[in-house]
Amino acid sequence: MKKRLMFILLVLVLAVSAFAFPGTLESVKFDGTTLTSDSINKLNVERGEEYEIKVAFTPGVDLDDVEVEAFISGYEYSDDERISDRSGVFDADANTTYVKKLKIRIPDDADEDSYKLRIIVSDRHNSPLVANFNLKIGLQRHDVKIKDVILNPNGIVEAGSAVIATVRVDNDGEKDEKDVRVEVSIPKLGVSDVEYIDEIESDDEENTEEIFLRIPRCAAPGVYDLNVEVAYSGRHKTVSAKKSVQVVAGEDCGDSSSEEQASVVLVGLQSQTGKPGETLVYPITFSNNGKNSKMFSVSAESVEWADVSVTPSNAVVVPGKDSKVVYLNLKLNDDVEAGSRVFYANIASDDKSENVAFTANVVAESSSPAGWLEFIVIVLVVAIIVLGLIVFFRSRDEKEYY
């Protein structure tokens, strides 16, 4: 019985040995650092970076159709992008050490966590040689990326009209970024504009306000590079992106008189009255009498005694022979004192801009014009009723007298 059991075990050992990979994994270097299989210590790597992996192994026998693969499993979006690389298929001679260089990139959106780097050496027939190494994917201290650039109009724009750009900025670093500077420019046309994002928290993203570039009226038709540059970390670091904009000829090029008369800005009521806590609304109409689309914008100064905003947007593109209205909203503070106050807004159309004064007449609750008006109406109604009664009784008395 014992001899039979020993024989079965020997057969099993020989069977397993027959299909085990006939070779030895000599070393694995990750970006120059030698890794130890299943070590307690983890190697820290940063997402958004590409790393080189060198795998050295020695076969004990001649092998055909060998390949080496490195991969990290557990990435959320591995269906679309795997963290892996593999060598081509090659033949290997016995007792000869082979070194294969692989490269993997850690995605920007990989979770900060512990992972396994898996190295597999295999051929067609034998069981694979597998080794696991512990990694820790972490964040860079400062790591900002341009996630998207949205243009309006997208792709094609007429000379003399405007391109509106909105830039989405992603902060993949471990530090919050403040005062992020975003510049959009078309160098060959000599136009640029800058917006700032006050703060982008770590592992979050923010959009800029709309950034406006007016294409020169007589710009040559063609395809131009639109450059986006984002400066962060106290402007010590920058990241850039590029998009293409196709400019087509404008209809008014060379006719300066029609261009001068193309834009009309109509400011509505520049003086409004309200109580503390109320919102005063000042309508502004932009009218475009020209043939090409025109850009208009409103930029209001901030005041301590109210919140100022523009709806639906602080800038609009008005098609030719059309008009649009924006509203300058002034929300009075609850504790603002009564009196007449002036604030300014910059209204720009085409290449012109003008500072326009607006007045807010703040009244106390007791001196509200609406209250006085209501009181006057009541007094008038009472006076009319009294007068009517007097006339009625006098006429009745006269009839009785006769």
Image (spheres, helix red, strand yellow):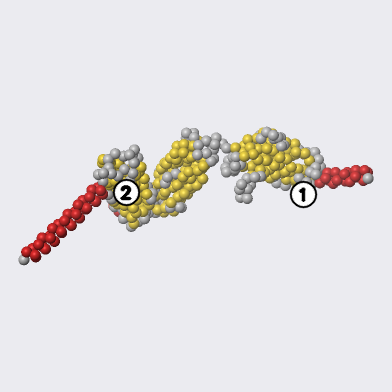
Q: Earlier in the sequence, mark 1 or mark 2?
A: 1
What residue type is disc 1 on?
Arg
Residue 352 x/y as whole percent: 31, 46
Question: From the viewer's perspective, is 237 left or right of 28?
Answer: left
SS type, badge 2 = strand
SS type, badge 1 = loop
Residue 333 x/y as whole percent: 34, 41
Question: From the viewer's perspective, is 45 left or right of 368?
Answer: right
**Residues at marks 1 and 2 touching, judged by CB atoms closer than 8 Å:** no
Q: Which quarter shows the C terminus?
A: bottom left
- List the residue tagged with mark 1: 124
Question: From the viewer's perspective, is 151 left or right of 45?
Answer: left
- Distance of label 1 from label 2 (alpha carbons): 77 Å
- List the residue tagged with mark 2: 281
Q: Residues within 10 Å of mark 2 (few under 14, many from 20)?
A: many
Q: Residue at x 93, y 43 (%)?
A: 2
Q: Residue at x 80, y 42 (%)?
A: 22
Residue 367 x/y as whole percent: 25, 44
Give the camera-side residue of 339 and 378.
378
Rendered view: 249 above or below 60: below
Give the camera-side residue of 286 and 302.
302
Q: Do we see residue 246 in this rendering?
A: no
Q: Which quarter shows the N terminus?
A: top right
Q: Do we see residue 212 in this rendering?
A: yes
Q: How many marks?
A: 2
Question: From the viewer's perspective, is 276 left or right of 90?
Answer: left
Residue 338 x/y as whole percent: 27, 40
What residue type is disc 2 on?
Val
